Image (cartoon, rainbow, N blue to C red):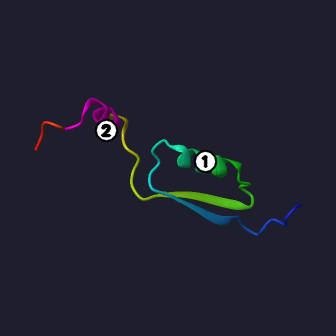
Amino acid sequence: MDWPSPARAVPVVYALETLASCGTTDLVGHLVAGLDRRRFAPEIVTLRPAPSPLSRLSDLAGGDRGRP
């Protein structure tokens, strides 16, 4: 079914906790990539920043276990 295009793209907001790599982030990425930009204007909002690659390495190495 063909829907008429609105006069301007309809804003759509996706809210995520973070952009850290996980299934939810991947799913939202695929949803946003598949939206018709003539009809929709997607935005992704996060509640906190994605962890840096260095913080992930620190977690894997044991973090700050020896510090108070």
Name the element at disc 2.
Answer: helix
Residue 57 located within the stretch drawn in magenta: yes
- What is the spatial separation of the Cα atoms under label 1 and label 2, in whole angstroms? 24 Å
* Residue underneath mark 2: 55
| Quarter placement of the N terminus | bottom right
Q: Locate residue 9: give its quadrant.
A: bottom right
User: Residue 32, how many percent across, how many down?
Assistant: 64, 52
Disc 1 crowd rating (10 Å Cα; few below 14, some 14-19, many 20+) is: few
Q: Are marks 1 and 2 in contact (CB under 8 Å)?
A: no
Name the element at disc 1.
Answer: helix
Magenta segment, prevailing SS (helix, strand or loop): helix
Magenta part of the protein: which range?
A: 55-64
Residue 50 located within the stretch drawn in magenta: no
The kind of residue on which mark 1 rests is: Leu
Q: Locate residue 10: give its quadrant.
A: bottom right
Q: How many marks?
A: 2
Disc 2 crowd rating (10 Å Cα; few below 14, some 14-19, many 20+) is: few
43 or 56: nearer the viewer: 56
The kind of residue on which mark 2 rests is: Ser
* Left or right: residue 34 compared with residue 14: right
Q: Residue at x 59, y 51 (%)?
A: 28
* Residue underneath mark 1: 27
58 or 34: nearer the viewer: 58
Q: Earlier in the sequence, mark 1 or mark 2?
A: 1
32 or 65: nearer the viewer: 65
Q: Residue at x 45, y 44 (%)?
A: 20
* Left or right: residue 38 compared with residue 16: right
* Left or right: residue 24 compared with residue 39: left
62 lies above or below 51: above
